[in-house]
Every structure is written in C-alpha cells, then in structure tokens.
Amino acid sequence: MSSPASSVQLLRELIAIPSVNPAFLPEHDPRTGEARMAEKVMEVARQAGLEVEQQTVVPGRANVVARLIPRGSPKHRLVLGPHLDTVGLPALDELLQPRLSRGRVIGRGACDTKGCVATMLTAIVTVARNGKRPTETEIVFAGFVDEENGQLGSRHFAQHHPPATLAIVGEPTRLEVVTAHKGDVWLQLTTQGRSAHGASPQLGRNAVHSMSRVVNLLETTYRAHLRRRSHPLLGFPTINVGSIRGGTQPNIVPDTCTISLDRRTLPGETEAQVRREISALLRKHRLKATFDNLRLAPCHPLETSPQHAWVRLLCGIAGRRKTVGVHYFCDAAPLAEAGTPAVVFGPGDIAQAHTRDEWISVAQLERGTRIFEKFLRSLP
C-alpha cells in the first residue's frame, strides 16, 4: 500500500494549478482551462509507466487518458473518471494557495474534484509501481474537461470509446457508492402581450401578468403533481423557476416576459415528456407560452444496478451495505447513456463544493486512496 500522505501532497500540488472552467471567467484569463492540470496528471502517470495520451475535445481543451495494461489479454475495462475543471474563484486567489489546517486540505477543487483526481491517480500509480496488477482488466484513468459546464469531456469520451465493464466517476460522495442521480432539464418559457402607454394600460395586454399566472401554476399545482411520483433512492422530481425577465420601465405595458426553469428528472423521464406535460398543464388552464431549450445537450438521469458484480465489490471494500442516490447530475450519465454502467464515488462532501472555503478531510482522502487501491488489486 502507498503512504496515504502521497495523495495529500498530490492534491496540494493540483490545487495550486488553476483550472477554472472558461464559463466562469472572462476570455483569455490565464487561470482558465484544464491544460496545466492535464500536464501535471500526464507527468505523474508517465513516471509510473502508464500509457498516456491527450484527446482533444475542443480547441485548447483535452481529456487526459492514462492506461494500466493488464498482465494478460484484456477482457474487462474499468474507467476511473474524475473531472479536471473547477468553478470560479472569489475576488482574491487565496483558494489557489492550498492550506492544511485542522485535518483539512483547503483550496479550490479540494473536493470537487481534485481530491478524486489525487486518490484515483495515487491508487493506479501505486498498483502500477508496487502492486500485482490485474490479469485481465485494463484500468483507464480519464481526466475529463468541462464537467462544470456542458460535460463536453465525458460526452466526447463516451462517443469515441467502446463501453467498459464499469466506470467510477469521481465526485465528493463521502465515500458512499452512488448508483442513481437525477437528470436536469433547463427550459425557457415566454409569454406574449401587447405594449401600451402606462397611462392607458387597458389598451395593452400585460405579458408579466400572464407570466405570473404561469409561475403560480408551476410552483403550486405542477409541484404538487410531481410529489406524487417517487424513486426509491431519489425521492420525487422537482421544479424551480430560477429567473424572470419582463418589461422595460414602469410606464410601458410589457409585451414579453420570459422565465427559466430547472426541472430535475427521475430515471425514465425525458425532456420531451417534461415539455409535453407542462404544455398540457398550460392548455388545461388556458395559458399560452412558447418554449426554448437552455442547453444544447440533455443532462440525463443515472440508474445503475446495485447488483452489478463490480458495484457489489466496491460496496464491500468501502464498507457500504447499500447504494444511495443523489439529486445532482455529473459525468456518470453520459457514460451510462453510451452503454457503460457507471457509479459515482469519491472522498469529500458535496456540501463543500463551490464554496468560498472549499475543503476536504485528510481522513477521507486517505481512506479513499486505500479503498481505490484495494479495489484495483481485487479486479480479475
């Protein structure tokens, strides 16, 4: 087994490398992009003798793929898939200066998900250098770009690789094994009115007033309707009206009003189904609104069988009697959609993700490294 301190040291080095998703900073900001993180990961992997390559996803942004080849002919394939990007930073860059305090590693990406990168990479490097590598299983470390925005990295990987036996996607799950997560549909609804002078509002048709009826319907009747559905690990689907824009100034009757919706979906629900049921509800209440998508690619829900042999193996090694579900979505869904059974697993707590003082417990980091090492050694 490797010294647990190695993953802690690697994490501190990774935190010091800025890899902010370009969606969160102005164009050409030197802290954006995953390129320097990718270089560090490749350096560590090459030193351990892994086969390493970069796979361009979009210009200037590439997944890192490092392979540990089995001793014999490969019959199985495991993918370890954390993401390399982080969300943005506070006004100051103090989160790029990793600190170790009270048993915690503090810094941007500490738990989301540079902690997973450190534990997964340390485990695979240790097996490559010191351990008995699997006989029939190829182990693939895939560091994805763009999880924090459009999941371009995992979508590209899924499109260009055959399905694997299992993928373990790194996210801060407190070392719980996640076999289900919700999907997410973002929609925009617009109501149309007729403008008029504010002194004679009866001559116009107020689009904001029309939209207020739509919002009330979604947040009451539709929300109550959703609560009648249930999933054993995920509970019920949800709806949230996240923004509203309408009108220009007080003395003009607004002729348009637009809202954005976040609709969390359960396994089996589709974006087309969501659009149909909202449209049907609006028609039933004689309300009119037009739809637009706010995402180019759908964020599907995830559901993997807890009875999958390697899922049960991971649960046993992690000391978990059952799997769990989470309400957020991640890179596991695109991989599963392409045919690879996927689970979500890693050290850290999602409650710390994206926070101003993001941190991860050293104890979780060390335990996560040991779990991954033992799991890799247990594969055929």
Image (cartoon, helix red, strand yellow):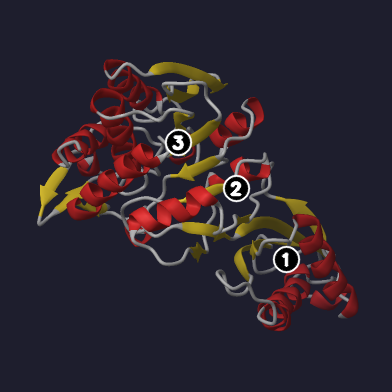
Q: Which residue is mark 2?
A: 333
Q: Which residue is mark 1?
A: 252
Q: Position of residue 196 (x, y in %)?
A: 81, 67
Of helix, strand and loop, which one carries label 2? helix
Nearer the observer, disc 2 or disc 1?
Answer: 2
Q: Which residue is mark 3?
A: 380
Of helix, strand and loop, which one carries label 3? loop
Up/down of 350 relative to 149, above or below: below
In the picture provided, is 213 more to the left or to the right than 43?
right
- In the image, what residue type sits under mark 3? Pro
- Foreground residue among 76 and 209: 76
Picture residue at 38% right of the left edge, 57% below the top: 316
- Foreground residue among 142 and 166: 166
Q: Position of residue 339 (x, y in %)?
A: 66, 41
The span from disc 2 to disc 1 (Cα, nearest Å) is 46 Å
Q: Residues within 10 Å of mark 2 (few under 14, many from 20)?
A: many
Picture residue at 31% right of the left edge, 25% below the top: 128
Quadrant of the image containing the C terminus: top left
Q: Position of residue 270 (x, y in %)?
A: 75, 57
